[in-house]
Amino acid sequence: MLGMKIAVEGCCHGELDKIYETIEYLEKKEAVKVDLLLCCGDFQAVRNEGDMKCMAVPAKYRMMQTFYKYYSGEKKAPVLTIFIGGNHEASNHLQELPYGGWVAPNIYYLGYAGVVRYKGIRIGGLSGIFKSHDYRKGHHEFPPYNPETLRSVYHIRNIEVFKLKQIQMPIDIFLSHDWPRGIYHYGNTEELLRKKKFLREEVETNTLGSPAAKELLAHLQPSYWFSAHLHVKFAAVMQHPPKGNAAPRVTKFLSLDKCLPYREFLQIVDIPDRPSSSEGLEYDPEWFAVLKATNSLQSTTPHRWNPPENNGLHERWDFGASETDMMQVVEDLSGELGIPDNFSQTLPPYDPSNPRPNASPSYNTNPQTTELCAKLGLTDIYSKVGQRGDDMGRSQSRGEGEDDEENESADEPSEYPTDTSGLSSSYNPDEITIEDEWEEDEGGEEGGESKANLTSDIHTPSRMVLPEPKSVVSPSHPSLLMNLPPPSHSTPKAAPGQSEAGQEGECDGTDEVTAARTLKRSSNESSKTGNRGTTPRIKRRNQVIYQSMDDDECEG
């Protein structure tokens, strides 16, 4: 069976030109054709100067980058691109598409949560990062944001996790920005901590990552799970406990770096395709049936909400899709599952010849969402927040100046819902950032390298050897050395015993990740004189333990 070549990219940070150039170079060098690009957040779909003010980054790092060229039509994405949101996004743009949609021709956003199909492959995703004290709220934010809502807008909500937990049919690929909590125990943990020393405490106490994503990993058990956020390449293989009489499923996890010189930000994997009704991107009937069933549960207020449970207090708690529900979705779509090419601009794009640095953030509904809601009977929740106007939406947006980069959401006790991990407390590492992360190691170890050297110095191993699957049934997590591809700009010696460990760690099976290629971008960008060297200062925000107020509930 022929397979698809899927490029997976870590944090995009608006560097679309460089990412597509890297793919084009690799296609020529390896004589392959990439079918699909998956981006794991921090996409930064910034259309103009107003959008930049809706992005939670320090003011000095608000740069237009290159997305606007694809939004304006100056350029078109050379490969179909699917992405999720992270914690550095033009949030007002993504809020226009709560159920997903095109942000530019050939560039598709999965929404707050979403599932789509491409050539028979089922791809799901969850946007944002976990933050316990916003987890139970509705999507109440509205531009212009204040320093609090500028950040809470990208925090994952339990309603999205609840929707994804209704999925019963197998998922092939899942995307999240932050990592599922505990996944670092299923790969080369020591190598991870050698690269990111400041994560040791969180790893050793098993408090790093998202408990919501951990729960979804256990429920969905996808074949592949791709993440980003921590700006490091890390691979792991997790064997799940068997469900009923079925054979245990295995998830191959990969997190990648951000798009910078000398960084492992791109990986190409071969994934078997399946017969499909379409060569293009398709809606997923089961997902849409879940959206229809859970539409009345959605909230656009900051009031806390718990999902319905089978505890005698709720008339309905199972919102899974029946075959009849899925057939109704097909009927709603007039039998056409192909996602229409119905992108349209909702704001004027950035014009380099006529800059507008004082442009204000804009609120617009999106015709794609309006059309989809009309077909399926869904609520456009962004429009609903906007209709509240001064009553709620804009009152949430009055703050003390949007450039206050240090102001974070006020810490408060977590009331972690009973449908999640069952922990009585949750550690919140989602705001771990390396200070001035856009400058971090930007020049690389060797200083700037010219783009001309890219073709001569790239090393692309024929495969990536993953660690041996570790079962969640076993509490022991022995350290395994992984034979990961070496950096493209150098070929360091393997650690003693690494080759043997790598051979023992090979993952057998017909769906093994083969012909995987790693590429780091070379650049003529030189090291900045103000760079802080190889040991950046660490900034941690909101590093506190949110103790649950309802321990009894969480133990249920």
Image (tube, rainbow, N blue to C red):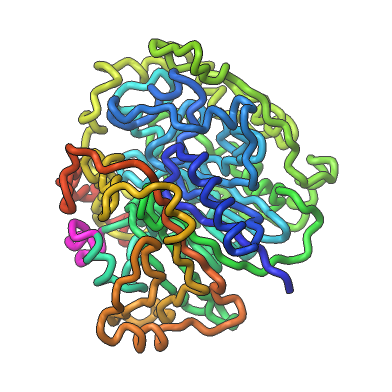
- Residue sitting nearer the eye, 332 or 18: 18
Residue 274 is left or right of residue 252, and the answer is right
| Rendered view: 128 above or below 514 | above
Residue at 56 percent of width and 22 percent of height:
383
The relative height of residue 393 versus residue 225 in the rendered view (above or below) is: above
541 magenta-colored? no
Q: Is residue 203 magenta?
A: yes
513 on left or right of 371: left
Where 514 falls versus 116 (above or below)?
Answer: below
Can see residue 387?
yes
The magenta stretch is 196-207
Q: Is the stretch drawn in magenta largely helix, strand or loop?
A: helix
In the drawing, does residue 389 fall left or right of residue 74?
A: left
Residue nearest the viewer, comparing 305 with 199? 199
- Residue drawn 19% across and 63% down? 200
Which residue is rendered at x = 54% and y = 65% of the image?
222
Q: Which one is in front, 527 or 545? A: 527
Q: Can residue 216 be seen in this view?
A: no
Viewport quadrant of the C terminus: bottom left
Task: Indicate the position of residue 544 as horizontal and vertical percent values.
Answer: 17, 47
> The N terminus appears in which quarter of the rendering?
bottom right
- The relative height of residue 131 versus residue 419 in the rendered view (above or below) is above
Residue ID at (30%, 45%):
442
Query: What is the number of callouts on the image?
Result: 0
Q: Position of residue 384 (x, y in %)?
A: 55, 23
Give residue 345's quadrant in the image: top right
Instruction: Give residue 76's position: percent from left, percent from top.
Output: 64, 36
- Residue 206: give x, y in percent of width and height: 25, 64
As rendered, which of 553 and 111 lies closer to the eye? 111
